[in-house]
Image (cartoon, rainbow, N blue to C red):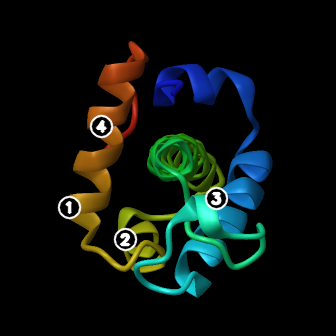
């Protein structure tokens, strides 16, 4: 089973979401306690490998969405949005939005020229 790092390099966010939803839906609709080997495909329980793939895809989606979110925060700031507005758009406080973004910038090795 590939790790999230391997999967992240192989798929786009859109591809990851499509596959994730396919597996998640099948898992949700599968009869409880049914052995995957006794199934015909659609509506069948996930195999161990598929369950692990679903977990890895979930992690990849979180990573890719988080990266895109922080890029959009940067865009919002550069177009004049206040931290109060950004916090409201993220359903958080302006302080939390600012701290999260500063942490992300540090992790990316990007200089911090944004004001609080």
User: Which label lies toward us, 3 or 4?
Assistant: 3
Query: In the displayed structure, would residue 89 be above or below residue 18?
Result: below
Question: What is the x, y in percent for residue 109?
Answer: 39, 13
- x%, y% of residue 116? 27, 49
Indicate which disc residue 87 carries: 2
- The residue tagged 3 is 20
Please, which residue is most extreme toward the top here?
Answer: 109
Across and down, in percent, residue 108 comes to 42, 19
Q: Are marks 1 and 2 in contact (CB under 8 Å)?
A: yes
Alpha-carbon distance for marks 3 and 1?
A: 33 Å
Q: Counting residues from the N terminus, which is met first, the one under dot 1 or under dot 2?
A: 2
Foreground of the two, 31 or 29: 31
- Identify the mark nearer the N-term, 1 or 4: 1
Describe residue 16's horizontal placement relative to residue 7 as left or right. Answer: right
- Pointer 2 with pointer 4, Cβ within 8 A: no
Q: Residues within 10 Å of mark 4 (few under 14, many from 20)?
A: some
Cα gap from disc 2 to disc 3, whole angstroms: 29 Å
**At 29% across and 74% down in the image, what residue appears?**
92
For the residues marked 2 and 4, what is the alpha-carbon distance in whole angstroms? 14 Å
- As helix, strand or loop, the secondary structure at mark 3 comes to helix
In the image, 95 versus 2, the foreground residue is 2
Q: Position of residue 64 (x, y in %)?
A: 57, 42
Q: Which residue is mark 1?
A: 95
Outermost residue toward the front in this view: 38
Q: Residue 102 has which mark? A: 4
Residue at 61% in and 51% down: 72
CB under 8 Å between discs 2 and 3: no
Helix, strand or loop at mark 4:
helix
Query: Residue 112: in sight, yes or no?
Result: no
């Amino acid at each position: 089973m590939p790790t999230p790092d391997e999967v992240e390099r192989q798929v786009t966010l859109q591809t990851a979401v499509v596959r994730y939803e396919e597996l998640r839906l099948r898992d949700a609709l599968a009869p409880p306690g049914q052995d995957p080997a006794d199934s015909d495909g659609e509506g069948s329980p996930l195999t161990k490998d598929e369950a692990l793939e679903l977990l890895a895809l979930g992690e990849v989606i979180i990573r890719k969405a988080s990266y895109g979110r922080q890029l959009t925060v940067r865009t919002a700031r550069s177009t004049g949005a206040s931290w109060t507005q950004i916090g409201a758009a993220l359903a958080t406080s302006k302080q939390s939005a600012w701290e999260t973004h500063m942490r992300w910038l540090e992790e990316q090795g990007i200089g911090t020229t944004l004001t609080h």
